[in-house]
Every structure is written in C-alpha cells, then in structure tokens.
Amino acid sequence: MQDVIDILKARGLLEAVTDPALQQKLCAGPVTLYGGFDPTSSSLQIGNLAAIMVLAHFQRCGHKVIALVGGATGMIGDPSGKSDERSLLSAEEVARNAVGIRENLSRFLDFNHPSAPAMLVNNHDWMKQFTFVDFLRDVGKHFRLGAMLAKESVKARLNSEAGMSFAEFSYQLLQAYDFLHLYDKFGCALQVGGSDQWGNITAGIDLVRKLRGADAYGATFPLVCDSAGRKFGKSEGNDVYLDSAKTSCYDFYQFFFRVEDADVGRLLRVFTFLPLAEIESLEA
C-alpha cells in the first residue's frame, strides 16, 4: 500500500502521531479511521478542508474513512482552541446543517467506492440512547479528573476570563465514546484531527484500551492559518465557506488569489492533489 504517512508529511498535513507503530500498521493493510465535523453551519469552510483532504488521502491509499457529524456533540460545542463558550444549537438546526455537510464531503470523498466507500455517521444516533445517569455510570467512571484537568485545551480555558462550563468540560467524554462506538461497530482504530484535538483524541484512545484492551491510534495535522496567524474558522470571523450560497465562487477565488506568494506552495500542498514536483516547479 502507498505510505499515507509519508504523503501527509510531504504535504504539511501531519503534525504528530500517538504511536510511531501507526505507520507500519497503515502500510500493512487497510485501516478504518474517522474524523469529526461540528455541524455549526450548513456548510463546512476552508478550515475544515484540511481535515477533508487528510481523509481523502487516506481513502486514495486504500483505507476506509468515516466522516462523523457531531449531531450530539455539536449541541454542546468543543472548547478546544476557543476562548469563549460556543452558542448552543437546537437539534433541528444540527439536523439541517448535517445535510449540507454531507453535500460538501461528497465532493471530496467517494461514498460509492467499490472496495472502500466512505461512510457518514452522526453521533446523535448512538448518544440519544443514554440517560445522564447511564452515561456517567458506563462512560464517566472510566475517566480521572486529574488526567482531564491536565489536557491543554482544558487548562487554557480554566485560566481564561471566560472559564469553562461543566458541559464543555464533559465534551472529551463524549468524543472519547464516539471512538469506542466506532471501534465496536466498524473496527475503527484511528482518529484524525487538528492539532487542537490532541486531548480529545487521546481520551478516546485511553477509553478503547481500558474497555476493549485494544490498540487505538491518533494522528493530528497542523491548523491552517491565514497571513495574520489566525485559524480559518467560522468563529474567527475569517470564514470562507465551501458552499457557493454562503461564499460566492468569485469571493472564493479572490480569497486564494490574494494569498501571499510565500504561502502559495504551502497551501497548494494542503488543499490540492497536484504532484509535489509540479508544486515545486510553480514555487521556483
């Protein structure tokens, strides 16, 4: 199989892995992996496109990819990398947004691949089975406060002026259970996400190991930032959507046309499938 880790490294789409053995495992045969998307809008945006490209590279190398829409977690909001609590969405808003996200993903991921079709799942489908007491008993008891408080995303928020709500603090439990559920149902052994997801990813790995005695892995990619060093994202005020109803084709083109020359090579590696030799030629 093609070495997807080397491909991601060469394209600036790999920051860290939880275990060096992951590369050998990926070269040995198909691995099922997942990446998550918050349904905070009816369209994904440029910040999400790096995650989509990572999944696409895995699929092109023969692995089985799962795109998870956070229908349940999206109603709480991931505190990672955020200085303030997100606005809460209703179940109806999340359901509407999930439809648009599938359309976005279908342009990059092959849901009809003959041997390894991509899958789209919604964590509300399994989270809705839990009562609060059941979740605390079946999942919460396997987490220790010391480890949860030590997560960088948690420490940053606790030290901020805004602080952190209990709902946000519980987010890592929900995402960890997603990993366990996907492991049980699909044999999913790898989660990918932005560098700000490290704490959530390792929480899921720990849960799979504790409850199933199985190896699970994580891989993160660098967050793609604009020329001012701000992460591309809806809450950062510099959003560029993948849906032309939200960002016109003209504005989408102009956004990339205005990129600083020094950033062009980096963004071509991240956001396109152009051969590296062609990108190097364009840089020269």
Image (cartoon, rainbow, N blue to C red):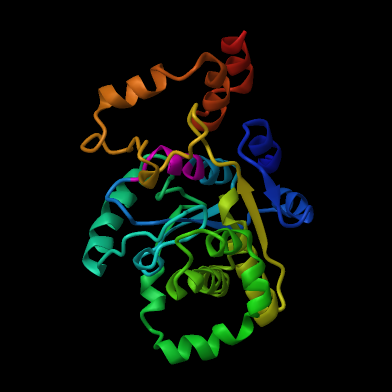
Foreground residue, 69 or 197? 197
Residue 150 image point, x, y percent: 67, 67
Q: Is residue 208 visible?
A: no
Above or below, comparing residue 58 to residue 155 in the picture:
above
Q: How many marks?
A: 0
Residue 92 pos. (x, y %)? 21, 66
Which of 268/61 is in front?
A: 268
Please determine whether, in this image, residue 256 is positioned above or below residue 74: above
Q: Residue furthest top?
A: 284
Closer-to-camera residue (37/108):
37
Instruction: Look at the image and say whether residue 46 sits in the magenta stretch.
Output: yes
Residue furthest front in the image: 161
What's the residue at 30%, 57% (across, down)?
Answer: 98
- The residue at the point 60 percent across, 63 percent down is 155
Task: Assign the C terminus to one quadrant of the image.
Answer: top right
Q: Picture quarter containing residue 95?
A: bottom left
Image quadrant occupied by the N terminus? top right
Please give the range of residues in magenta. Answer: 44-52
In the rendered image, is residue 198 in sight? yes
| Residue 174 falls inside the magenta stretch | no
**Residue 232 placed where, x, y %?**
44, 38
Q: Is residue 229 left or right of residue 107?
A: right
Report the side of 33 relative to 44 (left or right).
Answer: right
Query: Where is residue 120 drawn, in percent x and y?
Result: 40, 58
Q: Is residue 43 above or below residue 163?
A: above
Note whether 250 is above or below 106 in the view shown.
above
| Residue at the (40%, 17%) spot, across then down | 258
Residue located at (64% from left, 17% from top): 277
Q: Quadrant of residue 18?
A: bottom right
Q: Main secondary structure of the magenta part?
A: helix
